[in-house]
Amino acid sequence: MIKVSVIVPVYNPGKNIRDLVRTVLGQTLPADEYEVIFVDDGSTDDTPALLDELAAEHANVRVEHTPNSGWPGRPRNIGTDLAQGEYVLYADNDDWIGKEALQRLYDKAKADDADVVVGKVVGHGKDVARPIFAANQAGVGLDWEPLVTLLSPHKLFRRAFLDEQGIRFPEGRRRLEDHVFMVNAYARTRKVSVLADYPCYHWVRRRRSASFRRLDPTGYYRDLEEVLDILDRHVEPGELRDRLYSNWYRGKLLRRVGGPAFVRRTEGDEAYSRELFEEIRRVAERRFGDRMEPYLPFSLRVRSYLLRTGSFEGLLALAAFESQLEARAIGYPRAHGKGLAVRVDLALRGAEQPLRFERFGDEERPRVRWVPPPGPLRDALPDEVLDATDDFAASRPGLFLRSPKTLSEYPVATKGEARLITDGTVAQAGDARLNPSRASGGSPLRGGTWELHAIADVAGFSAPAQVSRRMASEPMLLRMGADGQLVERKPPKPPAPPPAPPRLRQRVVGRVPGGPAVWRAVRGGQSRA
């Protein structure tokens, strides 16, 4: 019985395919219980011959050669139609998977009777939303908010579910084909599980991939609207639909008119940056409007206001301001049961322009507002847009553990607050308890060294920092000890300096008549000839 079919679209990967081949053929699931289907999309390098050799050497490897389609949708569909497994897993040719991924994903799917299993994704040069992997889940659907924060297709699907629902990837050269596929799948089931306690899929950022091609604004946002149309067919108008819409509003619209990338793109090609801005503004007005703002943090509400009012210069100034924010985090750990309690003091500062807030209003109902730097940004923002009272009060730092070896990350539940200092700058503190028996997505933390990282976040203005020990002299490292307890890993002691040689002294050993004294160097009080 074939339990899992791994489907891999392939196009000119070169050496980048080696990690995937090595890991997909080295699974703990027995080789006769899974198959690997490589669909070669008209590669022109040595890949076709390599794949044919693999198929000749491994009974569970199949290869299908097809003319080039230019995008992964068609080869994925071909692989799905060829698959014999009870479940299918989609993997890209330049990524790789964990050694136990197939066995764990399959076991989770069977235990939960799941149509879809989202295995923990580790980003290598890619941002992966952390809340979705805070703990294992079962029986969730679109009403579970973190689900739509990760819409890549690298997940396990029940093949019969895809066939019965007619779910396939759009074909041809187009953007967001994975979003179309995933929204169709999520909208048709509440049998989605999350496997958070094992790193299943390693997602690698490579600049030669199709996703790095410069996007055509009109075509890209036409494809985005197709995704929204699918959502509209399955989710009634109202709070849930608006909350889901806000995920694309943040990630596909507001993100593209903010941050360092927006500044660099404008410096390199202002005409294209303005063209993209105008298309984003049209889509924002047509599909989103101001009803998204209740689901945005203060900083993104400011960005949204500037977008909707057409202030390109204001957005550019805001992006430059946010790009220069820096964070520092000092940790103070102490033993707590079998784990650690950690207090982290954070500072969020501007390297060039300070992040400042001020109090206003009366004593009974004090308010807090952001003080933007003078210039085009301040000129574009009316006073009512600057009120950040509720978001400031709700500001919490984020903490997460990170393995420097595997890059796996796990969020740590944190309590905290932000407070104004007399000059209007902000200090923040967070308190967390690290429980080693549940720190890895609800399961015991694996052995080895772990770093503690923080995200200082004040009203949505944020910056990351690695947590340092006390006076920021060295990073705070943690490890799982042999006794199963999470303990602080102290930095190794520097080697002792070599002993200093005995001090040389001089002694008068004689005097030349009528001349100077004769001196001799001695060591340790003994004269030397």
Image (cartoon, rainbow, N blue to C red):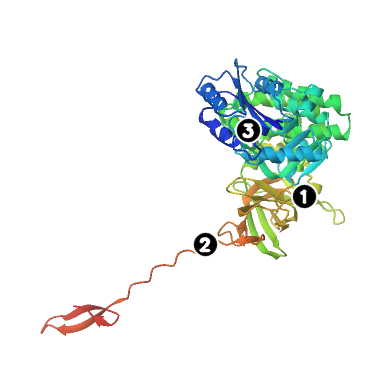
Quadrant showing the N terminus: top right
* Residue 18 image point, x, y percent: 54, 33
Camera-nearest residue between 275 and 384: 275
Q: Is residue 406 above or below residue 216?
A: below
Q: In the figure, residue 378 lies in which quadrant?
A: top right
Instruction: Give the spatial CA distance, label 2 vs label 3.
Output: 42 Å
Q: In the figure, residue 524 lies in which quadrant?
A: bottom left
Q: Give the residue type that dot 1 points to.
A: Phe
Instruction: Give the spatial CA distance, label 1 vs label 2.
Output: 40 Å
Q: Secondary structure at mark 1?
A: helix
Q: Check disc 2: other Cα within 10 Å, few if <14, some if 14-19, many if 20+.
A: few
Choose the circle earlier in sequence order: 1 or 3.
3
Camera-near label (2 vs 3) is 2
Q: Which residue is mark 1?
A: 392
| Residue 66 visible in image | yes
Q: Give the residue type that dot 2 points to.
A: Pro
Q: Which residue is mark 3?
A: 262
Camera-near label (1 vs 2) is 2
Instruction: Give the spatial CA distance, label 1 vs label 3.
Output: 26 Å
Q: Secondary structure at mark 3?
A: helix
Q: Is residue 503 above or below residue 148?
A: below
Q: Which residue is mark 2?
A: 492
